[in-house]
Structures are given as C-alpha cells and as structure tokens.
Image: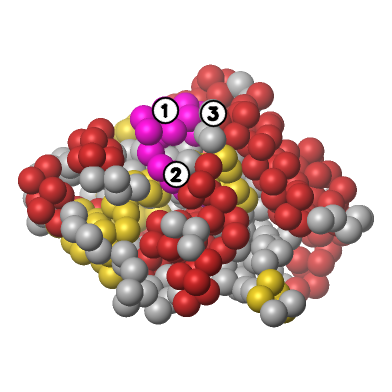
Amino acid sequence: MSRDSQSLLRELGVKPIINASGTLTILGGTTVADEVSEAWKEASTVYLDMNELHVKAGEFISKLTGAESAYVTVGTAASLVISIAACMTRGETEKMAQLPRTQDMRNQVIVQRLHHNEFEFLFEIAGAEIVEIGDEHVTTRAQLEDAICEKTAAVGYFAYDPQEGVLPLEAVLETSHRHDVPVIVDAAAEIPPLENLTKFIRMGCDLVLYSAGKDIGAPSDTGIILGRRELVRTCMRLGPHNRETINSKPRDYIGRPMKTSKEDVLAVVAALRRYFRTDHVHRYDEWEKKIRYMVSELSKCSGVKANRILSRHGHPRPVSIPRVELEFHNGMTGEEVSRKLLNGDPPIFAYVMGNRLYLNPQCLCDGEEEVVVSRITEILSARS
C-alpha cells in the first residue's frame, strides 16, 4: 500500500485489517499485485470500445482456460443473474427484452436442496423460478429426471464439493444434457486449486462462474463466465455494453446495471495471466509454514487446543486451503476471542464456528501470523 493511500485511509478514519479469514467480500475480497494495478491504471488513461475490449479479453481468457468463450462481469452474483437469463432466452431478442417477465418462456432452474444457500435467490432476479429437488440428506438422479420438463431453462450446481448426499456433477451433466438442458456451475470461491479453472469446462459444463476478485487477485468487483460460445455470447448481449438498437435507440437488457469498467476488465486479464504463471506449490508451502508456526505457538497456551485441519463443507471456501482450528477450554468462547481480536489495534478478522476459532493463512502477509499469535496469547493470558 502506498503512503498516499495510507494517508487517505487515516484521513477517513478507516483502519486496515489483518485478514485471518480469507478472500471475503466483506473484507474487500483480496489485494492486487503491482502488475494488476498497472493494468488498471493503463486502462484508466484511455477511452476504449468496450465491446471490442470484452471480445478480446474473452478470447485471451478462453486460450488460458480451454473454454469456448469467456466474459468478464462485475462478480459472481451478477454472473448468476446473467447466466440464467441467457439460458431462459437462448439469444432470442424479444425474450431478452422482456426480462424479468418470463411467463411465456422456459423459466425454471433446478437446484438441489442440499445446495440451498444465500445466493440462490439471484436466479429469481432474472425472473427464474427455483425448483428444489431432493432433501437435506440426499438427491437422486431420478429426482432430477422427474423435475426436468418443458419449462426447465437450466440446472444450477453450486460447487460445494465434497458434500455428502449431493448428486455428483457428472450425473447432473449426463442427465441434463440428455434433455438438452444446460448446467450452470457456481464455482465462485473454488480457486485454488488452479486446476479448477479448467476442470469444470473439461467436464462439459455449459457455463462456469468464478469470482476474479478472490484468489485470482483481480479487483473485488469482478467475475468471469466461461462456457459454450452461444451462451456466453448471449450473456455478453445481456450485459451493459451491447450495441443493439430498436427504432434507432439503444436497447438495454437486464444486465445494464451490472456495468464493468474498462479498468476492471483489463485488470482481470492481468490477474488471470499472473495466476497461471504463479508457483502455487510455493504458495502452499508458505501457508503451511504459517500454520505450523501458529499451531506450535498457540499449543503452548493453557486452555486452548490448536490443530491444523483441512477445511470441509460448511466452512468458508475454498476447502483446499488448510486452516488452524482453535478450541477453547478455559471458559472463553470463539466469539469472545474473535470480538477481542477485531476490537484490537490493528483489527484482526478471524471466523468462528461453534466454540472454535479458525485462522486461514491465505491472506496473511509475512509476519502477520506472529501478530495474530501474540494477540491471541495476550487475550488468553488476560483470562487466566
């Protein structure tokens, strides 16, 4: 962070946070590397044909990922809206123009009950009707078969694997494609590992949605749609930079409020290029070093049990990153420790589940793991 940026934050009275939770939207997503900032600045100094920029950026991203086509959005939430809109309208101009009024078109999206989450409603913004299948324990292929009908626009799949009882993506794809129904995969926070940027396309998913503003390292308000050429093209048409007219007047669609800036589009390209060049083995090694240090030092404290764990379903994504799990036996709760960390200087943000506090090394700068350990040790010592 530059001195001027720090001065402006001080002027506003906003304190930078030590992030021991991960690439959360409420913490600003991620930090960006110098080459990403430089790409953002480059775009900020010129005027561009936004349609051309989107096309060229999509071609570049497609070559990296192996997708037929790609489109940069203002985040995965917007991508969910635009993707189901593309599946409902299939590029038919009049249907695109009438969204979110969908009475006379395929307007149902099938989602497994086990995937029920706080983002599911975004399909409804485009006018889709959510049809949930299965229950809280299991979803079967027969239930998916029975739910598919002439009103089905798409099947939505939230990539929260591994999750017991979920109908696997392979079975969802086979069943859906047999009925010519596209599958939308929300893989927003499934990076890392790097291979997940190509895995779902190789499996044959029709549209795959990622947050670019998490581990990929682009600005927080960005996302990427990968997928079949005709569907991605419809997503682009539904977005804010189409050139279609009616009676010589611009025709805007449901994606008009979801405006990507030229700066963000170029920053996504730079971040993704950098991500494919990154030594991810080294990154994991650095995370493991921080974890070993925190577990070793915090295990010396009385009243706390410290372990290295692999994340699992129900934890913040991605599950591929190991964490430190702290369980308290001294009368303190995870919520109490978390609150004291956040109220300190500098504030430290860690997440809590039950009576356990979790420390994610993903966003810790070098040396910040020592600050985290010192603060937790002080909090525990004060309670002794």
Upstream in the sequence, badge 3 or badge 2? 3
Residue, disc 1: 202
Q: Please say if the residues under marks 2 and 1 sit with CB atoms less than 8 Å apart.
A: no
Q: Tell whether position 196 is magenta.
A: yes
Q: How far across and how far down the image is residue 352, in percent?
A: 34, 55
Q: Nearer the viewer, residue 102 or 305?
A: 102
In the picture as drawn, the residue positioned furthest to the right comes out as: 45
Q: How far across and how far down the image is residue 247, in percent?
A: 69, 79
- Secondary structure of residue under mark 3: loop
Vertical order, 27 against 20 (above or below): below
Say whether residue 127 is left or right of residue 314. right
Q: Tell whether position 254 is magenta.
A: no
Q: Please say if the residues under marks 3 and 2 sit with CB atoms less than 8 Å apart.
A: no
The residue positioned 32% from the left and 77% from the top of the image is 103
Q: Amino acid at mark 2?
A: Val
Q: Nearer the viewer, residue 380 or 50?
A: 50
Q: Quadrant of residue 173?
A: top left
Mark number displayed over residue 66: 3
Mark number displayed over residue 208: 2
* Distance of label 1 from label 3 (alpha carbons): 8 Å
Q: Please report the bounds of the magenta region as a residue range.
A: 194-214
Say whether residue 51 is left or right of residue 160. right
How are the residues colored?
A: secondary structure
Q: How far across and how far down the image is residue 105, in percent?
A: 34, 69
Q: Quadrant of residue 263?
A: bottom right
The residue positioned 87% from the left and 48% from the top of the image is 42
Vertical order, 375 against 280 (above or below): below
The residue positioned 57% from the left and 71% from the top of the image is 253
Q: Residues within 10 Å of mark 3 (few under 14, many from 20)?
A: some
